[in-house]
Amino acid sequence: METLLDVLVRVQNRFHALGMRRKAVLSQLPLNVTLLLVAVVLLFVDPRTLSAPAFVVGQAIALALLGLCAVVPWHRLPAWAVLAIPLLDFAPLALLRPGAGGVISGLGLLGVFPVIWLSGSGYRPRLTVALSALASLLMVWLPLLALGAAEPHSLVSEIVVPFMLVAVAVSIAVLTMSGMAQQRRVEELLARSETRQRLLDTILDTVDVGVLLLDRDGKDVFMNTKQRQLYLASVPPGATEVDESELLVYRDGSDQPLGHEERPVARAVAGDTMTREVFRLGRGPESRTVSISAREFRDAAGERAGTVLACSDVTEVIAAVRARDSFLAAMSHEFRTPLTSLLGYAELLQDDPSLSPSAVSDLQVMSRNARHLRKMVDDILAASVEGSAPDLPRVRLDLSRLVQQAADSAAPDAEAREIALTVEADGELPILGDRSAVARILDNLISNALKYSDEGTKVTLTLEREGNWAVCSVADEGFGIAPEDLTRVFTRFQRGDAALRSGVPGTGLGLALAQEVAELLGGGLEVTSQLGVGSVFTLRLPLAGQNEG
């Protein structure tokens, strides 16, 4: 059963939505009901009072005012016109007080009803308070004047009731103005909040990213247009409404549907954080590949309120990347075959004693350029193969020996350019890694040092232990790297301005791939350089004893 307070609160919340006529009737009704109660009390206490002319006229005026509230088209009149009713309410009260005042005391306090109506209207509070004070005084003084009893002491003795009514009027006016100010502030905040909500909805429906908002129980709270499209892609063919567990969700590259606990929504509800994980929605040509990220959000109290999932459609991107990789792999294979033949025949021709020195020199140029082209092809192929680097085999290797072998391979190029290539090592440096991968790093570092060094300079390879690290430094005396280029020296397809001006050929892939492989082996690659002095590339790899076990 609802309590009286609940009923009053509900009526108050609905009161502002009513029309002016109903508001007027409901505002006048409490006074009429109270006057009816006065009549009932007088019926039992002093029935003769009911027939007094003043009492009858007062009740009639009160009923007439209630009737006016019900029949007057207040919506066609100014908003302040309805305030004439509470002002007129003081007339029946002025008639009732003298006749029934001797039987029922305190009838003057009934003036609180019109006072509340006037001062609570919010219309010109100073004026309504003044009118309430004037009407209250007239309510108690006019009967005295009419009866000829307007003595000074009589007038003063009746001042208490008007004073109380004025105090009520002031209090109600202050509370009303404060409430109206707060209401305006709330309405302003609501309007701004609604504007922001509409802006957010427009943005979410405009962006090409699916957004799904789940509450703490995993129920859908919001889904933008893009997310709805992705959802439809995962619905089985012919189905209309399906449970989340029945949606066609796969790992990218797999045809086995994910179990309930592996699905993105279930994981997000369980509190897992996802970052750009790739899934496939649906089957056949209409399927979509999506990258999903998920984060939970908390309310103002810090409690978990739900989860937000962002789904990016990467179908075309994945297809383009795979097409690119296939093309590069095929292109690299097609290039390697003729290059291998060219190198093989060039080396055979160089052994022919009948060739003139100039012909041998030409063959050496051909071989050098063919090797350079093959290295570029190998770099492009390595850059195009994604996901293979983490699976590098790990075997025990001696970094000092690998460096010496790399130096021996580069010795002919160094001699041809009159560059002194030296190795300084303090013994064996055991590491765990892939031989070809480490050799590729060393070849890149040494070949770069030779390419960007002038004739007559030197390149020094230094190997040493630093704590748990095996360190190989490749120092040259070339033209160096500008400070603004150092930040992107390990970025794919990026080359410094000095390198471009020098005319030295390159793809900008060697150092980037070298750093990636070094990091996969648990190490790193660093560089320091000074323009006009040279550069030092430092390779750090964990010693074998730190990787084993």
Image (spheres, rainbow, N blue to C red):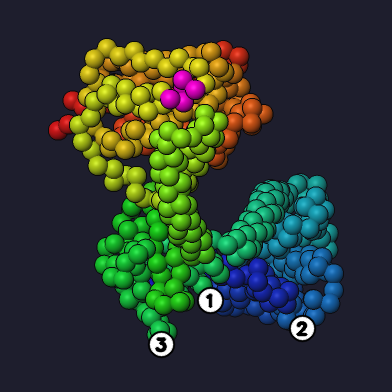
**Which residue has dot 3 on it?**
238
Label 2 sits on what residue type? Val
Label 3 sits on what residue type? Gly
- Label 3 vs label 2, nearer the camera: 3
* Image coords of residue 119 (percent x, y): 73, 56
Dot 2 and dot 1 residues touching (CB under 8 Å)? no
Q: Quadrant of residue 83?
A: bottom right
Q: Nearer the viewer, residue 283 or 116?
A: 283
Quarter of the N terminus within the rendering: bottom left
**Which residue has dot 1 on it?**
44
Which residues fall within the magenta stretch? 412-416
As drawn, 372 above or below 158: above
Q: Residue furthest left?
A: 549
The residue located at (52%, 32%) in the rendering is: 356
Q: CA distance from mark 1 to mark 3?
A: 80 Å
Mark 1 or mark 3, earlier in chain: 1
**Which residue has dot 2 on it?**
71
Q: Is residue 413 magenta?
A: yes
Question: From the viewer's perspective, is 286 left or right of 204?
Answer: left
The residue located at (42%, 17%) in the rendering is: 421
Q: Is residue 67 magenta?
A: no
The residue located at (76%, 83%) in the rendering is: 71
Mark 3 or mark 2, earlier in chain: 2
Is disc 3 surrounded by few (<14), some (14 to 19) or many (20+) residues within 10 Å? few
Question: From the viewer's perspective, is 209 left or right of 73?
Answer: left
Number of numbered discs on residues: 3
Question: From the viewer's perspective, is 228 left or right of 464?
Answer: right
Query: Element type at marker 1?
Result: helix
* Image coords of residue 426 (percent x, y): 27, 12
Q: Nearer the viewer, residue 159 or 298?
A: 298
Query: Element type at marker 3?
Result: loop
